[in-house]
């Protein structure tokens, strides 16, 4: 009688039943493990306190993220590491497994502010800002959304007009991650030549930033409102390669890509907490995990988590091959945020009353994911992107 191979009798990893991790390369797993160790050591011990107090120590954490190499890691040159899209994705997964605010900081710094400068800036602008931003010695933000304009950026009210060789900037931006702590803001404004991007340094006369109070989500993150009242900018403050909405939207696509990976990390963290709790917590003389209804919840979470992980890996491979389309990014963002939210909510039910405390991560993740569901394109917008891809008909208006 033939013996059974050892691999056939080995139990699957309950946190990765399909072994999706095996689809990653050695380099990708190394980056995953390195970022995970960083968050375990320097971020997780403080998250409950940061979330409860509504603070995030940007100036202390940014240089550490720079040393880790994750700021603009998917860009080439200027102090950036030039990593692949999938390597960047697994880093985002581990960052958001800690907290969505942490991944948001890295995403806004790298995929929005730095990427806009890298793609559309002059050589002088790149040399001035990218090495400092990559090292975390400087912080950047990205101003597109406005108080009265969210999903329709073509209707923006922020204006830039010429005054001799200078530009005069007037308007406001809302829900800007890193806004009040940024050294430079990448601001998008309507001009007589269409939408253009401008680099606005902190401290410029007429430029003010204030943090948005009363947040119940992304509390361990800086979220601000920016105001521009006759801000005078020199001609070389404009990003010369950016003209029209395609420029900021292309950077948003990069940020959305990070989200579709990051939310897998948040979902995994909630699922892990639920599995551990179900094993340890006893009710009616037995572990919660021994009840059929609890097992059904855990199985449903495991199925959806693995599918979301597979979606992320597939889109990462497409992006590395230069074949990813906007519809692919919308597919991943729409599916994976929905999945993560449902897993967070289900995990909370397994933890019962304990699930609403900061002693466990699930409700913190759930609250954060309510913001992630909306920013970088709402579910409605991504649905319409996919609807157009399916039917060939635009239904935005």
Image (cartoon, rainbow, N blue to C red):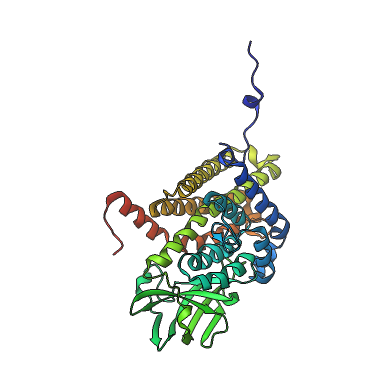
Task: Give percent across and percent down for residue 232.
Answer: 47, 87
Q: Is residue 306 above or below residue 61?
A: above
Q: Residue at x 44, y 83 (%)?
A: 169
Q: Is residue 393 above or below residue 292?
A: below
Q: Quadrant of the N terminus?
A: top right
Q: Is residue 26 visible?
A: yes
Q: Pick out the residue farthest to the front.
A: 123
Q: Residue at x 41, y 64 (%)?
A: 249
Task: Give percent across and percent down for residue 337.
Answer: 49, 54
Q: Residue at x 62, y 69 (%)?
A: 132
Task: Give percent across and percent down for residue 198.
Answer: 46, 76
Q: Residue at x 58, y 75 (%)?
A: 182
Q: Is residue 361 above or below residue 204?
A: above
* Relative to 222, 321 lies left or right: left
Task: Count the labels in the image.
Answer: 0
Q: Residue 355 appears in which quarter of the rendering?
A: bottom right
Q: Pick out the residue farthest to the top.
A: 1
Task: Give percent across and percent down for residue 390.
Answer: 31, 49
Q: Quadrant of the C terminus?
A: bottom left
Q: Nearer the viewer, residue 176 or 88?
A: 88
Q: Is residue 377 visible?
A: no
Q: Nearer the viewer, residue 103 or 345?
A: 103
């Amino acid at each position: 009688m033939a013996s059974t191979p050892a691999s056939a009798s080995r139990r699957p990893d309950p946190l990765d039943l399909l072994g999706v991790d095996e689809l990653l390369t050695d380099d990708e797993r190394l980056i995953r493990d390195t970022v995970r160790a960083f968050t375990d050591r320097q971020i997780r011990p403080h998250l409950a306190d940061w979330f409860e107090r509504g603070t995030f120590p940007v100036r202390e954490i940014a240089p550490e993220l720079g040393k880790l190499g994750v700021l603009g890691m998917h860009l080439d040159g200027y102090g950036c590491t030039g990593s692949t899209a999938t390597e960047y994705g697994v880093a985002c997964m581990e960052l958001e497994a800690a907290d969505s605010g942490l991944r948001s900081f890295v995403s806004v710094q790298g995929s929005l502010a730095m990427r806009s400068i890298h793609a559309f800036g002059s050589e002088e602008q790149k040399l001035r800002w990218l090495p400092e931003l990559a090292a975390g010695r400087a912080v950047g933000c990205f101003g597109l959304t406005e108080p009265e304009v969210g999903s329709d950026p073509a209707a923006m009210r922020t204006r830039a007009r010429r005054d001799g060789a200078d530009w005069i900037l007037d308007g406001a931006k809302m829900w800007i991650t890193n806004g009040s702590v940024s050294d430079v803001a990448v601001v998008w404004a309507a001009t007589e030549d269409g939408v253009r991007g401008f680099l606005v340094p902190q401290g410029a006369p007429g430029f003010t930033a204030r943090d948005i109070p009363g947040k119940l989500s992304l509390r361990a993150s800086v979220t601000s409102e920016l105001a521009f009242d006759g801000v005078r900018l020199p001609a070389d403050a404009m990003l010369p390669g950016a003209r029209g909405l395609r420029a900021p939207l292309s950077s948003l696509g990069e940020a959305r890509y990070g989200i579709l990976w990051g939310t897998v990390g948040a979902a995994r963290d909630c699922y892990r907490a639920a599995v551990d709790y179900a094993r340890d917590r006893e009710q009616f003389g037995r572990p919660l995990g021994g009840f059929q209804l609890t097992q059904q919840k855990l199985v449903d979470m495991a199925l959806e988590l693995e599918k979301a992980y597979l979606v992320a890996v597939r889109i990462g491979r497409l992006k590395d091959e230069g074949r990813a389309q906007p519809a692919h990014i919308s597919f991943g963002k729409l599916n994976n945020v929905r999945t993560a939210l449902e897993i967070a909510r289900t995990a909370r039910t397994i933890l019962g009353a304990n699930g609403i405390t900061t002693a466990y991560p699930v409700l913190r993740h759930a609250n954060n994911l309510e913001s992630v569901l909306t920013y970088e394109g709402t579910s409605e917008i991504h649905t319409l992107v996919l609807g157009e891809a399916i039917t060939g008909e635009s239904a935005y208006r």
